[in-house]
Amino acid sequence: MMKNNARLFKTVLRYAALFCFFLTPFPIFSIVVQDNVLSVSYFFYAILLLEIVGFFGFALRNLLEHFKKLPAFLITILLILFAIALVSGAFYLFFGALSLNLVYVVILDAALLVLYIFALKMFDRAYDNILTRGWFLFSAGLNVLILLVAHFTVANFTIEPMLIVFLFCVAVFAVILNQRAIDVVMDRRGHSASQLPPRIRYYNMILVAVVLAIAILLIVFRTPVVNGAKAAFSAIGGVLLRFLRWFGGLFVREQQGGEEEISAPEMEEDIAEIGEPGDPMVSRIAFIILVSLIVLFSIRPVYRKIRVLVSKLVLLLKQWIHRERVFAKHRTDENEYYTDTEETIDHDGRILDDLSPAKALRNWKKELKSFLKMPDSKEKLIYGYKLASRGLELHGCKIDPGNTQLDVLSKARSSLKGDAFEAATWCYNALVFGGYEDDLKFPQMEESLTQIRALPAVKK
């Protein structure tokens, strides 16, 4: 049941990604609809037309793939004929039925033809290879470009349809990125995606859906929201202004006649009169800023640097507030209520005493000799990896209890030569986490332990 749900979930994501990909030319249709003063229903007609053309090309290519006996040139001719039919039908629809400008007709026909060609190439792509980072940057740039063109060519241009469609596509793109990261981690560990609890997938999808719904509600009801915010700021500003005048009156000196010096009345500025709700220029600037921020945070290196900088600032703020100093970790953390002691357990399950570094290294070398005498088996490899991890720690490699195998491997690369330990690590992962490994890496594990034994011992 879990396996079927995982496959169904990926199928739904794939068709959602196709739906958003086919909406890429929507900004072009939006500017045409508004420039020709068409009704709001034409926005839905444009979305319907784009989806029909996109899914028609997608379904046509899938259908022709089942007829493998057909020659390749015949399939190409059929696809070209359908493309000509689509362009001709769109030309008749735009130029004949809607009576649009010939320039607009050519642009819309070209957009539909390009969409049809891309739809033909989507038939074999997985859900995480449809809405790529390149598509996202192109779509964001197209939205900004159409907005700039509309500012100089279309009067009273509204950005709500473009913004809602773009945010919907961004939300689907975010869900796909998150699910792809989960699937990559599961595949790297050798697990099946069907073993993942459904609530992990659904939680992220619901979170993105809630954020999208809030954003759309703020866009649709922006006029009452802006009016309410202005009214609130006006009320707060009026109260503060009266308080400041009263407070300033306490320090006014009295004149000789006993009358207070009255300053000239100042003109009050009504905050509610600054700007108008739904101002097109303000909306367009906000839209450009929103798209720019999304593009900025979609570039991974820039996002990482910003995240590291913000993390450092937050850490400095916490240290300044709590006045804490970071000391080295102690093996024993005690207070009057409990004692939490870190104990070392050997491979047989016995609790060892806290040994000196020299004695612990001698015991490790004895276990290494016992390892080399063991017959080849899966248990030997598993025991060998644990021995290698403990040996790295004894020879100065700082390994924390929460480190994964990839963390240990990245720390060991600076001390070990070659790729023997890397091969042994992947073999250990496959054996422990249920993966498939047809070639057990006994020579690589022994070579790794030999290199670790030759490392200089840590001095404490």
Image (tube, rainbow, N blue to C red):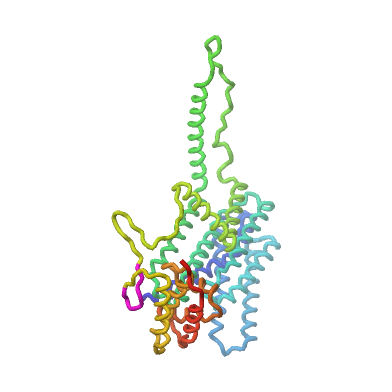
Name the spot of residue 444 as percent of width and height, x first.
Answer: 49, 84
Q: Would residue 347 be found to the left or right of residue 396 on screen? A: left
- Closest to the observer, 83 or 263: 263
Q: Over which residues does the magenta segment extend?
A: 343-350
Say which residue appears at 56% left-offset and 88% top-offset: 68
- Closest to the observer, 310 or 88: 310
Q: Residue furthest left?
A: 337
Note whether residue 434 is visible: no
Give the main secondary structure, helix, strand or loop, of the magenta stretch.
loop
Say which residue appears at 56% left-offset and 16% top-offset: 261
Note whether residue 130 is visible: yes
Name the spot of residue 330 as percent of width and height, x first.
Answer: 40, 61
Say which residue appears at 59% left-offset and 60% top-offset: 302
Tell me if residue 68 comes above or below residue 158 in the rendering: below
Pick the quarter of the image with the N terminus: bottom left
Tell me if residue 310 comes above or below residue 400 in the rendering: above
Q: Would residue 420 be found to the left or right of residue 368 on screen? A: right
Tell me if residue 182 comes above or below residue 218 in the rendering: below
Q: Residue furthest right?
A: 103
Count of number-bearing discs:
0
- Closest to the observer, 213 or 70: 213
**Is residue 334 found inside the magenta-colored segment of the image?**
no
- Closest to the observer, 426 or 184: 426
